[in-house]
């Protein structure tokens, strides 16, 4: 099943980290997706635009594309995700982060 979760801002948490915005998936996203097996993230330097696709996730319940909840330039990608997507399976908001945006 392929889901588009583009309009639901409840699937992302944001946090200020040194003047940048850190994005991650919320507990609601985890409940909708199930265990995340793979994620295709933007690269450092990529620009993301609100309501435009920026993230693709393959999980046990669905393959989903997400639209960005904010505009900006990606300045960091969670390095733990380079080799292991288990880091995204933490359901505690604020822990399993995806990218930092400036």
Image (tube, rainbow, N blue to C red):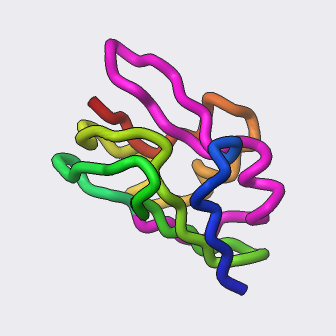
Picture coordinates of residue 46, whole percent (x, y) = 21, 52
Picture coordinates of residue 14, whole percent (x, y) = 54, 29
Q: Does 4 sit above or below residue 7?
A: below
**68 with respect to 18 (left or right):** right
Q: Residue at x 42, y 67 (%)?
A: 40
For the N terminus, the image quarter is bottom right
Q: Residue at x 34, y 50 (%)?
A: 49
Please name whichever residue, 3 or 91, is drawn nearer the observer in this view of the structure: 3
Q: Does 75 sit above or below residue 40?
A: above
Q: Quadrant of residue 12?
A: top right
**61 with respect to 57 (left or right):** right
For the image, the number of numbered tags is 0
List the single residue furthest toward the left. 45
Q: Does 73 sit above or below residue 61?
A: above
Q: Residue at x 34, y 40 (%)?
A: 71
**48 with respect to 85 (left or right):** left
Q: Is residue 36 magenta?
A: yes
List the single residue furthest toward the bottom. 1
Task: Write down the region rendered in magenta.
Answer: 12-40
Please name whichever residue, 47 or 75, is drawn nearer the observer in this view of the structure: 47
List the single residue furthest toward the top. 18
Q: Residue at x 36, y 35 (%)?
A: 100
Q: Is residue 87 magenta?
A: no
For the C terminus, the image quarter is top left
Please name whichever residue, 47 or 79, is drawn nearer the observer in this view of the structure: 47
Picture coordinates of residue 101, whole percent (x, y) = 33, 35
Q: Does 6 sit above or below residue 62?
A: above
């Amino acid at each position: 099943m392929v889901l588009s979760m583009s309009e639901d801002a409840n699937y992302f948490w944001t946090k200020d980290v040194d003047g940048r915005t850190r994005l991650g998936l919320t507990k609601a996203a985890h409940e909708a997706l199930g265990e995340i097996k793979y994620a295709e993230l933007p690269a450092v330097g990529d620009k993301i635009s609100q309501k435009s696709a920026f993230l693709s996730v393959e999980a046990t319940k669905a393959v989903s594309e997400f639209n960005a909840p904010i505009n900006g330039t990606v300045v960091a990608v969670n390095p733990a995700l380079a080799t292991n997507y288990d880091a995204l399976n933490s359901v505690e908001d604020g822990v399993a982060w995806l990218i930092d945006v400036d």
